[in-house]
Structure formats: C-alpha cells, structure tokens
Amino acid sequence: MMTLKRVEEICSQFKEKKILVFGDVILDRYIFGSVNRISPEAPVPVVKVEREESRPGGAGNVAANVAKLGAEALLVGITGDDAFADELFNKLNSRSQRIVRSCLNKTMVKTRVIVQRQQLVRIDREEEIRVTPEIETAVLEKIQTAAVDGIIISDYAKGTLTPVIMEGLKQKAAAGHIPIVVDPKPPHYHLYKDIDGITPNLKEAEAIINKSIRDDSDAAKVLKIIRNKFRTRFAIITRGDRGITAGEKGKRTFHLPAFSHEVYDVTGAGDTVVSVLMLSLVSGATLKEAVGLANTAASIVVEKIGTSQVTIEEIQKRMKLLLRHL
C-alpha cells in the first residue's frame, strides 16, 4: 500500500523533470452562459454569454498538466499560422513550446458552449494536418535538440504524427534511455510498436481487439493482448467509472477502482492520466504507484469543467482522503 510519505517522495521529484510532449495541438475555447428562453426563430435554447475562455487542448493540455505539476513540458506539434495560433501561444509557456507554425495548415479549434456545468454543443474547426518533408524536418530538429527525461505522444489522429516522426521519437527515446509512452488513437495503431507504454481508454482498447470488455477478467486478458501486440513494457486501460486496469511484463495485472465523487466532465482526463503516469515513472515510482497517482489525479480532474489540470497539493489531499478510508 502506498503511504503519504511515499506520495510526497515521488511528487517532490517532479520539479526536476523535463518531459517532451508531442502530438496534435488544439485550441479549446469555452463559452459559458445561461439559458432562460427558447429562440422564436427555431426550437433551440438562447444562450446568454457570461464569459469566454480559451485553453490549450490536445497535446497542449498534456503539456499544461505536466507544467501544472511543477515539471517542464517541451511541447512539439504543428499549428496553422493564424489568429487562433496566436491565441493558443498566449496560453502557453513560450520558453517551453517548440511548435511549428505552418501556413499550409489551420489551427484546430474546438468551441464548447457550457450552461449550468453541462456542455450544450461543441463546434469544431478542424482540417487534417498536412505534414510535408520540410515540416517533418523542422519537427525532428525540435525533437532531437530537446534534453528531456521522458516522451509522451498525445495522438488525436489529426495528422501530426507520421511514420517518419514516430521513428524519430523512438530513436530519441532509445538514444537517451528514456521512456516513451503513447496515448493512442485507432488509425495509427501500426505506428506504436516497440515503445515503453500505451494508455488506451476502454473504447480504444476494444477497437484494438474488436471485442467488448465486460469486466475485470476481460480487461486483464485484453491488456495482455495489447502489450504483446505492441511489444510494450507495460499497458494500462482507463475504463471510466470502472477504474484502471494495468500490467507490465513479468508481473500480474492489477485493477484500481475509480475514485471520483462527482463527474462533471471527462474531457482531457486521459491527458491527466498520461502526464501523472510519466512524471511518476521518471521520478522513481513503480508502475503500480504511478498508476495509483494517475488514477487519483483523474478522479480530481473529472470534477472540473473542460480541459483542466491538477496540482501536487490536490493529489496529496485526495490521496490522504483515500488512504483514510482504506
């Protein structure tokens, strides 16, 4: 059983770590408002706007999670060269971002309308990212010159990850003897072999094997299939309200229950899981310890609205509460 002292030991190392986050960078915009009437023009609610926010999404949210935990996140990705990119860059730490701006592309934007803590509608501005040989060269240069302790690939299957870039990331990890973990998406499963870890959610895991996962026993079997398929050292399956199933080579698979009291928004929960998981592993945690901390962090972030992050203090407070009830 993990103790609070052990939690503090692991988390105290976060501030010394640098994590390279590569993937699809998205601008998440939020319109918060209230509804008091139905439009006379159509049977739809009229939203009175009260405030608007923008936040880094996709791989940007992973980087934001890493930074919120006190570590340095080096974000590498591709955006358009447009006003939305300007808006996104204003939300990022300019010292740590290594994004390639390309006039061939448009920055991806997801706009969510939120009323009384519930998402009413989402509006996507999205085109597949075009990656030319010149863009690949620019991206690889930014990857190769980064001195980091671990690599997270946040793949939303929007086009940023190519076979050439994936190979460059794996070579970077191998040369530096650092872990590389992928948060995957179905179209790119052929790219993920020979990495350290993979973190599919329930739907993604079922897509990999083309079967449903009904219980812990199914999850354990599927996890072994996934780990063997991608030749990874470990794999975890995030299963929503059924918790997390995880396992590594040569050790027994284990399950951790979900801890959340109230679930308002699962947006970005996987980003939080992979961020805490990576930081914990490079800070000396065992896989079980790292998954325990990641699961705890996820239980906090789903109680927030939109793409959000957690702090070390929040994790420690939640762990204290959980250990008290064991």
Image (cartoon, rainbow, N blue to C red):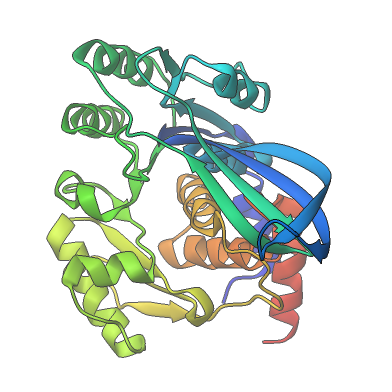
The residue drawn where x is 53% and y is 21% is 97
Above or below, comparing residue 48 to residue 66 in the picture: below
The residue drawn where x is 49% and y is 74% is 240
For the image, the number of numbered tags is 0
- The quadrant of the rendering that contains the C terminus is bottom right
Along the horizontal axis of the image, is 128 left or right of 61? left
The residue drawn where x is 29% and y is 35% is 159
Query: Which of the 4 quarters of the picture holds residue 258?
Result: bottom right
Considering depth in this image, is 145 or 288 the residue closer to the camera? 145
- The quadrant of the rendering that contains the N terminus is bottom right
Along the horizontal axis of the image, is 172 left or right of 38? left
Percent coordinates x, y for residue 81 in the rendering: 48, 14
Percent coordinates x, y for residue 126 in the rendering: 42, 37
Is residue 127 among what the camera can see? yes
Query: Which of the 4 quarters of the picture holds residue 71?
Result: top right
Is residue 93 among what the camera can see? no
Percent coordinates x, y for residue 281 in the rendering: 46, 51
Along the horizontal axis of the image, is 276 left or right of 190? right
Considering depth in this image, is 245 or 159 the residue closer to the camera? 159
Above or below, comparing residue 18 to residue 282 in the picture: above
Percent coordinates x, y for residue 252 in the rendering: 30, 78
Considering depth in this image, is 162 or 310 the residue closer to the camera? 162
Above or below, comparing residue 135 to residue 48 in the picture: above
